[in-house]
Amino acid sequence: MGKRLVPTWQPGWLAREGLTPEPQPWEDAWRTASQPNTFEWWYFDAQLDDGSTAVIVYYTRPFTKRRGPLLPTVNLTINKPDGAKLVRYKSYTPADFSASTTA
């Protein structure tokens, strides 16, 4: 049996999620703030002048522990041109965390 292909976009998908083709300011806000059993994450990636790449990910809680309390965490991964990899994690208390819910 062949593998089923799932397209990444279909008409109506954006509307079903309350989205439009043009991103809105609220989409850059904390969208799950009042919802229990959820997590949210944001990321930034970059290619640096020396050829290194960097990815920074911010989590509200681990996606595998959505029912737990907030555990704000930052993950930094840097891949250097020589193949070296630097990975760092730092978690914070919920009191240290804040995010806009409007943009």
Image (cartoon, helix red, strand yellow):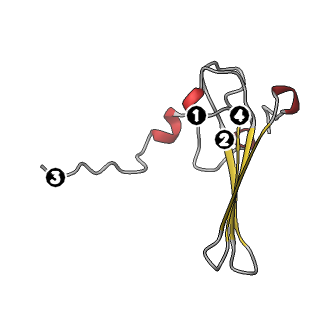
Describe the element under mark 2 as helix, strand or loop.
Answer: strand
Label 4 or label 3, whichever lies nearer to me, is 4
Q: Which residue is mark 2?
A: 41
Amino acid type of the residue that numbered disc 4 sits on in the rendered structure: Thr
Amino acid type of the residue that numbered disc 3 sits on in the rendered structure: Gly
Amino acid type of the residue that numbered disc 1 sits on in the rendered structure: Phe
Question: Hey, which residue is sitting farthest left in the picture?
Answer: 1
Q: Which residue is mark 1?
A: 63
Q: Are marks 4 and 1 in contact (CB under 8 Å)?
A: no
- Residue drawn at (58%, 34%), measured in percent from left and top? 63
Q: Are marks 2 and 4 in contact (CB under 8 Å)?
A: yes
Residue 56 location (% of width, % of height): 71, 54
Q: Are marks 1 and 2 in contact (CB under 8 Å)?
A: yes
The tag on residue 60 is 4
Q: Which residue is mark 3?
A: 2
Describe the element under mark 3 as helix, strand or loop.
Answer: loop
State the CA–CA distance, disc 1 to disc 2: 9 Å
